[in-house]
């Protein structure tokens, strides 16, 4: 595809529900990143993949958050037993190699609202 | 812990003005610094990327500078236009893995 796509674009969940957010990176991009952006704030790093390997998950706020990229392309961010504080926009980004000189291309985000 | 701060949080200017957005970071050990633009309901678009060894980058009406030793960067927008209205985010890359640390952003409104 032409860019990074994410689905769904909007998700409303009741507190306690599990949700799964999908990211389709640019074809051929090795690196994939997930960020969480609360209202009025800058994005905060959650986790990073290089191909199928999750190399950094230091930003995941709790063990309710889980991300995977089993075939090194599409990635899914899963949140179990959602809480109101999980309400945010979840952004996915990909880059060709993830090195210092690479531009990260961001998707439009998934806006999660937990009631 | 690296912290990135952007000042001001919001800015409103009349069309045609030149303006400067500020970004500061606490740890000078960065790989690069990027400026992004974010429109409401949309993802981030990279505007300029400055490597740690560089002092500035230019693209059209945009010029970004980097002073790594003092932990500061500025984004200069010349002859502002209403289409420049957006949130501008500064981010530093700490390592060669690509992990970005963002500031909170400056929301710019350019009035016609």
Image (spheres, coloured by chain):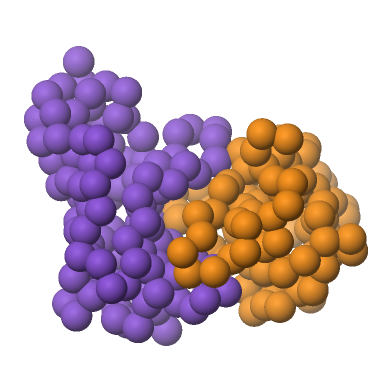
Chain colours: A orange, B purple
Where's residue A70, x and y in %? 89, 63
Residue occupying image coordinates x 71% and y 78%: A55
Residue occupying image coordinates x 45% and y 55%: A42
Where's residue B15, x and y in %? 15, 22
Identify whether B37 is placed above or below A103.
above
Task: In the displayed orientation, state which residue is furthest to the left.
Answer: B17
Residue occupying image coordinates x 62% and y 57%: A96
Where's residue B13, x and y in %? 15, 30
Q: Is residue B103 visible?
A: no
Q: Quarter-wise, where is residue A83 in the image?
A: bottom right
Which one is nearer the viewer's eye here, A89 or B34? B34
Q: Is residue B2 visible?
A: yes
Q: Is residue A16 left or right of residue B5?
A: right
Which one is nearer the viewer's eye here, A44 or A54? A54
Where's residue B18, x and y in %? 10, 36
Q: Quarter-wise, where is residue B102 in the image?
A: bottom left
Identify whether A12 is placed above or below A70.
above
Quarter of the N terminus of chain A within the rendering:
top right
């Amino acid at each position: 595809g032409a860019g990074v796509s994410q689905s769904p674009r909007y998700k409303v969940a009741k507190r306690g529900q599990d949700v799964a957010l999908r990211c389709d990176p640019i074809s051929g991009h090795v690196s994939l990143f997930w960020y969480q952006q609360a209202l009025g704030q800058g994005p905060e790093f959650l986790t990073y993949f290089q191909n199928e390997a999750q190399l950094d998950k230091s930003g995941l706020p709790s063990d309710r958050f889980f991300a995977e990229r089993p075939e090194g392309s599409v990635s899914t961010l899963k949140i179990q037993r959602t809480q109101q504080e999980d309400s945010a926009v979840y952004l996915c980004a990909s880059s060709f190699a993830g090195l210092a000189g690479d531009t990260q291309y961001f998707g439009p985000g998934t806006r999660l609202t937990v009631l | 812990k690296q912290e990135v701060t952007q000042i001001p949080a919001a800015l409103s200017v009349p069309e045609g003005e030149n303006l400067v957005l500020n970004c500061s970071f606490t740890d000078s050990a960065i790989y690069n610094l990027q400026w992004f633009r974010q429109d409401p309901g949309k993802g981030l678009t990279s505007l300029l990327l400055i490597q740690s060894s560089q002092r500035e980058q230019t693209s059209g009406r945009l010029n970004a500078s980097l002073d790594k030793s003092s932990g500061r960067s500025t984004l200069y927008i010349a002859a502002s236009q209403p289409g420049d209205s957006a949130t501008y985010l500064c981010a530093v890359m700490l390592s060669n893995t690509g992990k970005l640390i963002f500031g909170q952003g400056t929301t710019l409104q350019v009035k016609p």
